[in-house]
Image (cartoon, rainbow, N blue to C red):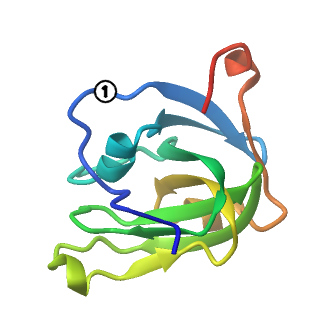
């Protein structure tokens, strides 16, 4: 079945950040690179600024499944295959229920990156399956996932 994680979790230590653009709209994203960071994701956070998010990079293309267990805020989930948006979930609601009662959100296509943004961002900017993400020019010399 692919990777299954808790993408919406409270990070104990600050994560590294990067600047990305999706169709020329810039965001500062925390990088959830390790399995532990990916398991924590944005869980327990009360707020996410409109220009912030989290990126979940994976080593290879695979089916990915996310859920909103212990999230306090709704999020847009954007699934990418080599920087190309292949699937999205608009405004995935938080889930404070037992794990077996939380909805899951499969990628519907092979993906190697997931980006979580504030709910409503995808619709606001019109991101669709023609959309692509890139690292900002100011971050190009840095090591990224």
- Residue lying furthest right: 130
In which quarter of the view is residue 74 placed? Answer: bottom left
On screen, 29 above or below 123? Answer: above
In which quarter of the view is residue 101 placed? Answer: bottom left
Q: Nearer the viewer, residue 92 or 25?
A: 92
- Residue lying furthest bottom: 101
Task: State left or right for residue 134 relative to residue 37.
Answer: right
Q: The C terminus is located in which quarter? A: top right
In which quarter of the view is residue 19 placed? Answer: top right
Q: Residue at x 35, y 49 (%)?
A: 41
Q: Residue at x 66, y 51 (%)?
A: 60
Q: Position of residue 13 (x, y in %)?
A: 25, 27
On screen, 127 above or below 145? Answer: below
Q: Position of residue 119 (x, y in %)?
A: 46, 63
Q: Residue at x 33, y 60 (%)?
A: 6
Q: Position of residue 61 (x, y in %)?
A: 68, 57
Q: Which residue in the structure is indicated by mark 1?
A: 14
Q: Residue at x 26, y 54 (%)?
A: 43
- Residue lying furthest front: 1
Q: Nearer the viewer, residue 50 or 20?
A: 20
Task: State left or right for residue 79 relative to residue 65.
Answer: right
Q: How many marks?
A: 1
Task: Tell me if mark 1 has few (under 14), some (14-19) or many (20+) residues whose alpha carbon lies within 10 angstroms of its own.
Answer: few
Q: Nearer the viewer, residue 39 or 60?
A: 60
Element type at mark 1: loop
């Amino acid at each position: 079945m692919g990777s299954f994680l808790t993408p919406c979790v409270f990070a104990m230590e600050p994560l590294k950040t990067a600047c990305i653009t999706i169709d020329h709209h810039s965001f500062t994203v925390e990088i959830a690179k390790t399995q532990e960071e990916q398991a924590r994701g944005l869980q327990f956070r009360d707020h996410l600024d409109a220009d912030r998010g989290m990126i979940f990079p994976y080593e290879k293309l695979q089916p990915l499944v996310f859920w909103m267990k212990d999230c306090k805020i709704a999020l847009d989930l954007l699934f990418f295959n080599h920087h190309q948006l292949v699937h999205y979930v608009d405004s995935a609601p938080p889930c404070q229920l037992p794990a077996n009662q939380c909805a899951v959100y499969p990628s519907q296509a092979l993906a190697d990156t997931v980006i979580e943004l504030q709910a409503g961002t995808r619709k606001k900017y019109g991101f669709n399956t023609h959309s692509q993400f890139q690292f900002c020019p100011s971050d190009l010399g840095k090591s990224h996932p």
